[in-house]
Image (spheres, rainbow, N blue to C red):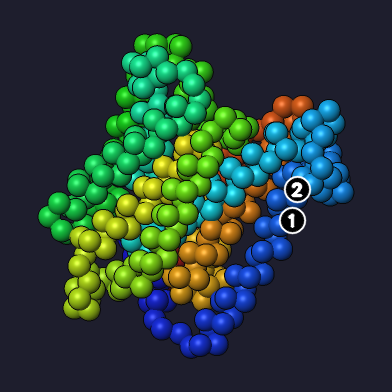
């Protein structure tokens, strides 16, 4: 389950690094445009001038100002944080497992969050959406810790294949348990609906500020660990020869993924395929340097999620298609394309 990443982590020239930084900076205008589209597009179209007026001179009696500030601005905030976190988590997972098909979902984070939310709401009678979001975070953390243990983390010998298989098994188990609860208790269906396909529609009711802080701290951890993660891509034997403590490096990487995914799920629910699509695009901007790739991944993830959310609002007005559905529509063909390229590379 290795990829060309192993061979592409070799040190590049200073020119390559400068080019990667410049290309990553080119993403900023796209991010600004995606943000403006998120604020302006919808059932009510709001011009950039009106957006500026709503931000600088908010009038609660103006319905356009209320739409921008109270409804769309929280969605923009959630899209930036959740999209960036998912993109970062995807790049870390692919570096950790040396597998271009790796998605943070293989850790069972999404299903762990859904499991915690459904059981917490039924057993504790929790109905507040903010509290349910907080329940998703420990559920994601416990699922990731279980995968790390099952994958050999307690023995200090986590292998990419074992990690992937452990995550897939736990993911299937948790989803089966959630489905069983829904079959027995129909009142859980409404709660589960949000956690099956993520959405930014309830962003104003989510704990945006606390989860933003968590995501920023996790991003800092990931950037600090970038050199260590690059040594992991060389293989366990060579990594040990370079003095890397595998279980600490792998555990730290999984901690960063858990924090990023927990924050994203708490804000937007499970958004599928974003962690799969973003890293290959980010590597085109980074010159295969992981530190730059992580920055590019955060920006591209935010751009894609904001575009998916905006497009979902425009397809079926006055209703909308959930952002998680939109990313799945795009991500399914991307998954097939990457798998076909891997197969052709193996046969060659």
In the picture, measured across the screen, residue 179 lies left or right of residue 65, that is left
Of residue 184 and residue 255, the one placed in the foreground of this image is 255
Kind of element beneath mark 1: helix
Please report contact status of discs 2 and 1: CB closer than 8 Å, yes or no. yes
Callout 1: 10 Å neighbours few (<14), some, many (20+)?
some
Q: Is residue 15 above or below residue 160?
A: below
Position of 301 with respect to 135 (left or right) is: right
Please report the residue visible at 53 percent of the width from the left and 83 percent of the height from the top. 16
Q: Quadrant of residue 24?
A: bottom right
Q: Which one is in front, 335 or 177?
A: 177
Distance of label 2 from label 1 (alpha carbons): 6 Å
Residue name at image x 66 percent, y 64 percent:
28
Q: Is residue 118 shown above or below 311?
A: above
Q: Provide the residue designation for mark 2.
A: 37
* Residue 62 visible: yes
- Residue highlighted by disc 1: 33
Image quadrant where residue 229 sits: bottom left
Q: Quadrant of the C terminus?
A: bottom left
Where does the N terminus fall, quadrant-wise? bottom left
Between 171 and 302, the one lying in front of the other is 302
Residue at x 17% of width, y 59% of height: 157
> Residue 264 at what x, y percent from top left?
48, 43
Q: Secondary structure at mark 2?
A: helix
């Amino acid at each position: 389950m290795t990829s060309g990443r192993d061979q592409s982590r070799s040190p590049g020239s200073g020119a390559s690094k400068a080019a990667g930084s410049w290309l990553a900076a080119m993403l900023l205008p796209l991010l600004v445009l995606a943000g403006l589209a998120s604020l302006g597009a919808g059932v009510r179209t709001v011009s950039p001038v009106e957006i500026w007026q709503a931000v600088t001179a908010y009038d609660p009696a103006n319905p356009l100002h209320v739409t921008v500030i109270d409804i769309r601005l929280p969605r923009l905030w959630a899209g930036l944080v959740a999209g960036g976190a998912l993109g970062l988590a995807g790049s870390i997972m692919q570096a950790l497992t040396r597998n271009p098909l790796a998605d943070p979902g293989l850790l069972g984070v999404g299903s762990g969050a859904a499991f915690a939310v459904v059981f917490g709401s039924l057993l504790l009678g929790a109905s507040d959406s903010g509290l349910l979001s907080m329940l998703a975070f420990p559920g994601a953390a416990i699922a990731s810790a279980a995968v790390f243990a099952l994958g050999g983390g307690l023995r200090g010998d986590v292998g990419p294949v074992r990690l992937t298989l452990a995550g897939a098994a736990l993911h299937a188990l948790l989803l089966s348990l959630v489905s069983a609860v829904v079959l027995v208790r129909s009142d859980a269906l409404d709660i589960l609906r949000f956690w099956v396909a993520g959405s930014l529609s309830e962003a104003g009711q989510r704990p945006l500020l606390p989860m933003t802080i968590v995501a920023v701290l996790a991003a800092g951890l990931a950037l600090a660990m970038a050199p260590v993660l690059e040594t992991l891509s060389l293989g366990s034997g060579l990594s040990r020869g370079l003095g890397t403590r595998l279980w600490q490096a792998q555990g730290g990487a999984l901690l960063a993924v858990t924090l990023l995914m927990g924050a994203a799920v708490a804000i937007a629910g499970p958004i599928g395929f974003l962690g799969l699509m973003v890293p290959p695009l980010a590597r085109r901007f980074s010159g295969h340097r992981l530190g730059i790739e992580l920055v590019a991944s955060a920006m591209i993830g935010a751009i894609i999620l904001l575009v998916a959310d905006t497009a979902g609002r425009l397809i079926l007005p006055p209703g909308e298609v959930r952002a998680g559905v939109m990313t799945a529509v795009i991500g399914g063909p991307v998954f097939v394309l990457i798998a076909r390229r891997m197969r052709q590379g193996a046969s060659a």
